[in-house]
Amino acid sequence: MGEGGRVSDWTSREYVVIKAKENGVHVIGLTRGDVTRFHHTEKLDKNEVMIAQFTEHTSAIKVRGRAVIYTAVGTIHTDRDD
Protein backbone atom coordinates (compact mmCIF):
# COMPACT_ATOMS: atom_id res chain seq x y z
CA MET A 1 0.00 0.00 0.00
CA GLY A 2 1.08 3.59 -0.52
CA GLU A 3 1.73 6.19 2.14
CA GLY A 4 -1.05 6.28 4.66
CA GLY A 5 -2.00 2.71 3.72
CA ARG A 6 -4.21 3.68 0.80
CA VAL A 7 -4.28 1.05 -1.92
CA SER A 8 -5.22 3.63 -4.56
CA ASP A 9 -1.80 5.29 -4.18
CA TRP A 10 -0.23 2.31 -5.97
CA THR A 11 -3.07 1.08 -8.18
CA SER A 12 -2.97 4.25 -10.26
CA ARG A 13 0.63 3.49 -11.38
CA GLU A 14 1.53 2.43 -14.91
CA TYR A 15 1.37 -1.24 -15.81
CA VAL A 16 3.97 -3.23 -17.74
CA VAL A 17 2.80 -6.15 -19.89
CA ILE A 18 5.27 -8.95 -20.63
CA LYS A 19 4.48 -11.54 -23.33
CA ALA A 20 6.78 -14.57 -23.56
CA LYS A 21 7.99 -15.48 -27.06
CA GLU A 22 9.53 -18.78 -25.86
CA ASN A 23 9.20 -21.21 -22.97
CA GLY A 24 11.10 -20.39 -19.80
CA VAL A 25 11.08 -16.57 -19.79
CA HIS A 26 11.94 -15.31 -16.31
CA VAL A 27 10.39 -12.15 -14.88
CA ILE A 28 12.17 -10.96 -11.74
CA GLY A 29 10.99 -8.24 -9.37
CA LEU A 30 13.69 -6.23 -7.58
CA THR A 31 13.17 -4.45 -4.28
CA ARG A 32 13.17 -0.76 -3.53
CA GLY A 33 15.43 0.72 -0.84
CA ASP A 34 19.08 1.02 0.15
CA VAL A 35 19.93 -2.49 -1.04
CA THR A 36 18.36 -3.89 -4.23
CA ARG A 37 17.41 -7.58 -3.92
CA PHE A 38 15.32 -10.10 -5.80
CA HIS A 39 11.91 -10.41 -4.15
CA HIS A 40 9.76 -12.27 -6.69
CA THR A 41 10.33 -14.50 -9.72
CA GLU A 42 7.86 -15.82 -12.28
CA LYS A 43 8.52 -18.20 -15.15
CA LEU A 44 6.44 -17.76 -18.30
CA ASP A 45 5.91 -20.20 -21.15
CA LYS A 46 5.47 -19.21 -24.80
CA ASN A 47 2.54 -16.83 -25.36
CA GLU A 48 1.85 -16.43 -21.63
CA VAL A 49 1.31 -12.84 -20.55
CA MET A 50 2.10 -11.22 -17.21
CA ILE A 51 0.79 -7.82 -16.18
CA ALA A 52 3.01 -6.13 -13.59
CA GLN A 53 3.37 -2.74 -11.98
CA PHE A 54 5.91 -0.92 -9.90
CA THR A 55 4.88 -0.73 -6.25
CA GLU A 56 6.20 0.43 -2.92
CA HIS A 57 8.20 -2.85 -2.85
CA THR A 58 9.17 -3.17 -6.54
CA SER A 59 11.58 -0.65 -8.05
CA ALA A 60 12.71 -2.65 -11.09
CA ILE A 61 11.64 -5.59 -13.22
CA LYS A 62 14.17 -7.78 -15.03
CA VAL A 63 13.14 -9.98 -17.96
CA ARG A 64 15.39 -12.87 -19.04
CA GLY A 65 14.53 -14.65 -22.30
CA ARG A 66 12.74 -13.77 -25.53
CA ALA A 67 9.76 -11.56 -24.77
CA VAL A 68 7.87 -8.45 -25.81
CA ILE A 69 7.42 -5.82 -23.09
CA TYR A 70 4.67 -3.24 -23.52
CA THR A 71 5.00 -0.01 -21.52
CA ALA A 72 3.52 3.48 -21.58
CA VAL A 73 6.68 4.72 -23.32
CA GLY A 74 6.89 2.03 -25.99
CA THR A 75 7.38 -1.61 -26.85
CA ILE A 76 10.63 -3.49 -26.22
CA HIS A 77 11.61 -6.76 -27.90
CA THR A 78 14.29 -8.54 -25.83
CA ASP A 79 15.55 -10.49 -28.83
CA ARG A 80 16.34 -7.47 -31.04
CA ASP A 81 19.28 -5.07 -31.14
CA ASP A 82 17.17 -2.01 -32.10
Image: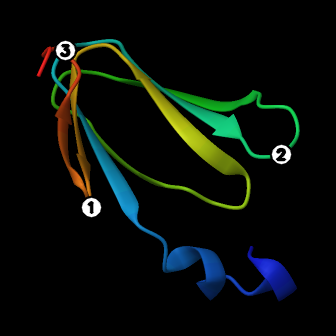
**Which labelled disc corresponds to residue 33?**
2
Q: Residue, x 73% and y 52% (percent of image)?
A: 57
Quadrant hosting residue 64: top left
**Badge 1: residue crowd in 10 Å (few <14, some 14–19, many ≥20):** few
Count of labels in the image: 3
Residue 13's spot in the image, x, y percent? 48, 72
Residue located beneath label 3 in the image: 22
Residue located beneath label 1 in the image: 72
Kind of residue at disc 2: Gly
Residue 44's spot in the image, x, y percent? 35, 25
Dot 2 falls on a residue whose secondary structure is loop
Dot 1 falls on a residue whose secondary structure is loop
Q: Residue, x 60% and y 86% (percent of image)?
A: 8
Which callout, 2 or 1, points at the residue further toward the start of the chain?
A: 2
Dot 3 falls on a residue whose secondary structure is loop
Q: Residue, x 74% and y 76% (percent of image)?
A: 2
